[in-house]
Every structure is written in structure tokens, then in C-alpha cells.
Image (spheres, rainbow, N blue to C red):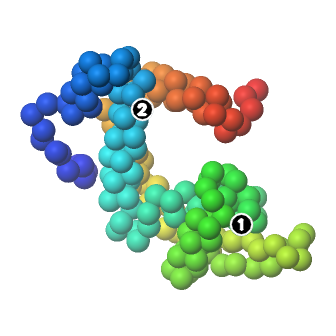
Amino acid sequence: MQVRKPLDLPFDPIARAAQTWESRFGAAKAMAAVTTIMRVQQILLAELDALLRPHDLTFARYEALVLLSFSRDGALPMSLIGQRLMVHPTSVTNIIDRLERQQLVVRKPNPRDGRGTLAEITPAGRDVIQRATADLMNAEFGMAGYGDDQLQELFDLLRELRVTAGDFKPG
């Protein structure tokens, strides 16, 4: 399923910007790489959201459901969801609010912490995850043009940036 809307530009605007950058400011390799990553993120997010739209999900809500489905009890504290998804607590609240309105999760008190709240995936949530995941897998998460070695190389290159940024401690 092709969901990307081609821009059909007669040239690569990032390469053109890099040429201009080079003549005005100096070395452009880092700027071109960052701009490319940001554009690829836009392209992939649009494609994944389009694939998930028939399931009434966005990629952010899909990630939250998958995270809950991976947990031992199907439930996690809201704060842990934010930490694992690497998003602000307000974003977690908005994501869970929407999933709750869709009856894909329920909120319940955290028995280990009287003040905390757990989000728990419902059977309907588990069902939608199965169907949505099948669609994403069939589309190879928008990465069908790459072989396994290329995907691993891409992961390794970008993982190093994440380590440097302090996302996690390797090893």
C-alpha cells in the first residue's frame, strides 16, 4: 500500500540548501544530515498514521497500546508510559484520554501507589493492536525499500546519536 504523497520536485531541496549553506556559512554535512532526518521523520509519521487511520489510531496511540500489551499485566503507571515512550506527561495524558474514550484502555488506581494511576489495555485494545500491527508489518513500517543489513546499519548509526544524547546507558 503506497500512502506517501510525492512532492515530485525537480531537484533535492535539501541538497540545494546544503550547497547554499556551504557557500554562505561553511561545512554543510551536519545540517544536511539533520534536515534529512527531520524530513524522513515527517514522511514516515505521515505514512504510519495513514496506515493506522482505518483503526482510528495515530502512531503515538499505537505505541502506547503496544507498550501496554508488552507489559506483564497489560497495565502500567502513567509516569512509566511517558518514560518508556520518551514523551512529556501531558502528552501521555492526552494519548490515554483518547484511548480511554475509544474504550481501548481503562484507568484504574495503582494498588502500589495510592496517588498513582494505571492505564490498562482492554480486550478491544488488544484486538486493534493485532489488526494494526498486521497492517504495519505488511507495509514494513514504511521501510520496504531497505534490506535487513541496511536497516541494522541505520539503527546502529542513529542509536549512537541517542546514546550521546543520554536516552539510555548502553550495556
Mark 2 or mark 1, earlier in chain:
2
Please tell me which residue is depicted at 70% across the width and 78% down the height of the picture.
107
Whether 159 is drawn above or below 107: the answer is above
Mark 2, Cα crowd under 10 Å, few <14 / some 14-19 / many 20+, is few
User: Dividing the picture into quarters, in which one does residue 120 lie?
Assistant: bottom right
The C terminus is located in which quarter?
Answer: top right
Between the residue at mark 2 and the residue at mark 1, the CA separation in whole angstroms equals: 31 Å
Looking at the image, residue 166 sits to the left or right of residue 116; the answer is left
Q: Are marks 2 and 1 in contact (CB under 8 Å)?
A: no
Toward the left, the furthest residue is 10
Question: Which of the labelled discs sits on residue 78, or is there none?
Answer: 1
Q: Is residue 116 left or right of residue 89?
A: right
Closer to the camera, 52 or 30? 30
- Residue in front for this viewpoint, 18 or 45: 18
Reading the image, the residue beneath label 2 is 34
The quarter holding residue 39 reads top left
Task: Provide residue 8's location: percent of width, then percent of height.
Answer: 12, 41
Tell me residue 140's x, y (percent): 39, 42
Tell me the element at label 2.
Answer: helix
Percent x, y of residue 111: 88, 74
